[in-house]
Amino acid sequence: MRKVAIFGGTFDPVHWGHLLIAETALSELALDLVIWVPARCPPHKLHSCWLDFDLRWQLVQLATYDRPDFLLLPKEKQLIGSSYAIETLEDLRSLYPNTHWYWIIGSDAFQTLPKWYRRQEIVPACDWLVAPRPRCLTDFVGDRSASVDFLCQQVVQQLNSQCIEIRWQVLQMPSVEVSSSLIRQYCRQSRSIRYLVPEAVRTYLEAEQGIRPIV
Ligand SMILES: Nc1ncnc2c1ncn2[C@@H]1O[C@H](COP(=O)(O)OP(=O)(O)OP(=O)(O)O)[C@@H](O)[C@H]1O
Ligand SMILES: O=C(O)c1ccc[n+]([C@@H]2O[C@H](COP(=O)([O-])O)[C@@H](O)[C@H]2O)c1
C-alpha cells in the first residue's frame, strides 16, 4: 500500500519552514509522496490573502519542481469555494486508491482540529503528522518537545470528548520561527527575505510583484 501525505496550507507565500516540514515527514515516515494542496480559499482565514491563488500556487511550484516525491495538486483539481480538508481528501482518495493517508500540519493548526468541518470523518481517515511550532509554545519553558506533546494531548482529549479517535505523532525536527506572516511583514517593511524563502521564490516575487528590496 502506498503511503501518501497531504500538506494543505495557504502558502501566502511558501517558505523554508514548509519545505523542512514536508521533507521531515517524507524521510521520517518513509512516505512515497507528499501532495501539496494550496488552499484556493482558506475556510478559516478571515483576512483575504496577500497573494492571489494563482501566484501562491506558482510559488509552490517553483519551490518544489525539482522533487519527484513532492507533488503539487494541479490548479484545475483545486476546489472552487472553501477548501475543506475532508473534500480535499475525498477527491484525492478517488485519484489514489489503495493508499494509507497522512496529513501534515503545524502544531498551531492542529489545535484547531476539534472545530474542523466534518471532523468525525477527516480525523480518523488520516495519520496526523504534527510539526512543532514555536509560536504556540510561548507559555512553556524548558523541554519544548514535551510541550508540543502536552498541547497535542489536549487536542486528543477534546476530540475524544466528541467521540473521535485520532492517530498522531510529532515530527522529529527543529522548530523554526519562519512564517508567511513574517515574510509579508518583511516585504511591507522592504526588508530582505533572502534565506527565509527558496531563492526562486524570492526572485519571482521580486520580478513579478515588484517586491523590494532584496539586497
Ligand atoms: N514554521 C513552521 N513550523 C511548523 N509548522 C508550520 C510552520 N510554518 C507553517 N506551518 C504549518 O504549515 C501549514 C500551512 O501553513 P500556512 O500556509 O498557513 O503558513 P503560515 O506560515 O502558518 O502562515 P501565516 O503566518 O500566514 O499564518 C499549517 O499547518 C501550519 O501550521
Ligand atoms: O476542513 C476544515 O474545516 C479546515 C479548517 C481549518 C484548516 N483546514 C486546513 O488546514 C490546512 C492549513 O491551513 P492554514 O490556514 O494553516 O494554511 C489547509 O489545508 C486548510 O484547508 C481545514
Image (cartoon, rainbow, N blue to C red):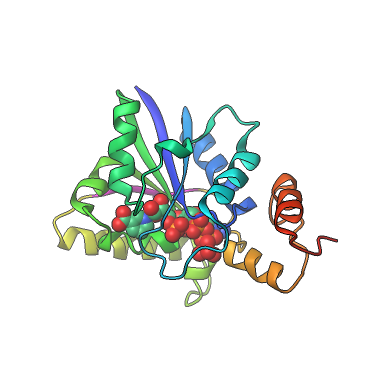
Q: Residue at x 49, y 70 (%)?
A: 137
The reply to whether residue 58 is in sight is: yes
Q: Position of residue 129 (x, y in %)?
A: 41, 47
* Viewer-closest of 49 and 165: 49
Q: Position of residue 102 (x, y in %)?
A: 37, 39
Quadrant containing the N terminus is top left
Q: Is residue 149 left or right of residue 195?
A: left
The outermost residue toward the right is 215
Q: Main secondary structure of the magenta part?
A: strand
* Magenta region, residue range: 166-171
Q: Residue at x 53, y 43 (%)?
A: 22
Q: Position of residue 193 (x, y in %)?
A: 74, 60
Q: Position of residue 161 (x, y in %)?
A: 16, 63
Q: Is residue 194 left or right of residue 40?
A: right
Q: Residue at x 38, y 65 (%)?
A: 151
Where is residue 78, by image quadrant? top left
Quadrant containing the C terminus is bottom right
* Viewer-closest of 123 and 153: 123
* Viewer-closest of 204 and 34: 204
Q: Residue at x 18, y 58 (%)?
A: 160
